[in-house]
Image: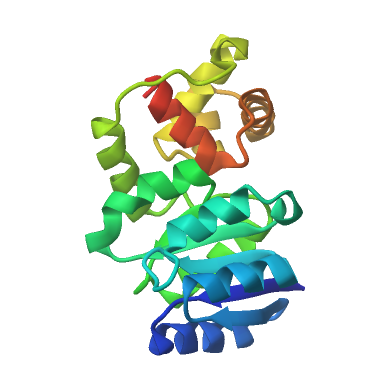
Amino acid sequence: MIRVVVADDQPLVRMGLRTLIETEDGVQLAGEAADGREALALIQSVKPDVVFLDIRMPLLDGLEVLRRVSADPACADVRIVMLTTFDLDEYVFEALRTGASGFLVKDSDPTDLLRAVHVVADGGSLLSPSVTRRVIDRFASGASARPVPHLDRLTEREREIMRHVASGASNDEIAAVLVISPATVRTHVSRAMVKLGARDRAQLVVFAVQSGLT
């Protein structure tokens, strides 16, 4: 059973997500929060598998909640998906850098929202949808290169695959381009994450952008 927490200050958004979650087999609503402080306390208390977290909330904004959860060893297994609107895109790169496993636009198709729960709970990241690629491209073009610890530990193949990951390509797409198996791609991605200390695929993309690999 995947336990999900919903944190958003808009009652209609919470109601929509609650209704959606309650209709999905294998997914359970673990709680709701209407502000950042309530969200942080709830997450640290129930330690859900997945959190839908609004970026902009009263008392404590979503990014600060994300920072505190990411820094809490007791919440190491909690995966956070940020909720945003197009006019808040400037926060997306910071959210991914801080430890979010992805983000969704609030008016996303219900199918995408449910897929997000399963993908993130399984350790994946939301880097496939076209809106994600556009936002990543936007911030990659404006981000300045900065040193990434242990980047020199990567092999040339791992760097190459990391560049493809940063473009939003899936393992199957990378495998097709490099003429290798998807399993080999997964192995290289996993090794790169371990060497760089990336929490998930989303942070691997951020490291690629920050280091100038893109």
Relative placement, left or right, of 156 versus 194 is left
Relative placement, left or right, of 175 versus 47 is left
Residue 114: % across, % down: 55, 72
For the point 57% across and 10% down, the residue is: 152
- The quarter in which the N terminus is drawn is bottom right
Q: How is the image coloured?
A: rainbow
For the point 60% across and 14% down, the residue is: 154
Q: Is residue 63 above or below residue 173?
A: below
- The quarter in which the C terminus is drawn is top left
Residue 124: % across, % down: 61, 50
Of residue 87 and residue 181, the one placed in the foreground of this image is 87
Of residue 140 and residue 91, the one placed in the foreground of this image is 91
Of residue 197 and residue 119, the one placed in the foreground of this image is 197
Q: Is residue 173 above or below residue 163?
A: below
Can the viewer see residue 130? no
Q: Is residue 93 above or below residue 43?
A: above
For the point 60% across and 34% down, the residue is: 198
Of residue 138 and residue 91, the one placed in the foreground of this image is 91
Numbered disc total: 0
Figure quadrant of residue 145: top left
Can the viewer see residue 61? yes
Q: Is residue 199 above or below residue 113?
A: above
For the point 28% across and 54% down, the residue is: 89
Residue 60: % across, % down: 45, 66
Residue 28: % across, % down: 69, 80
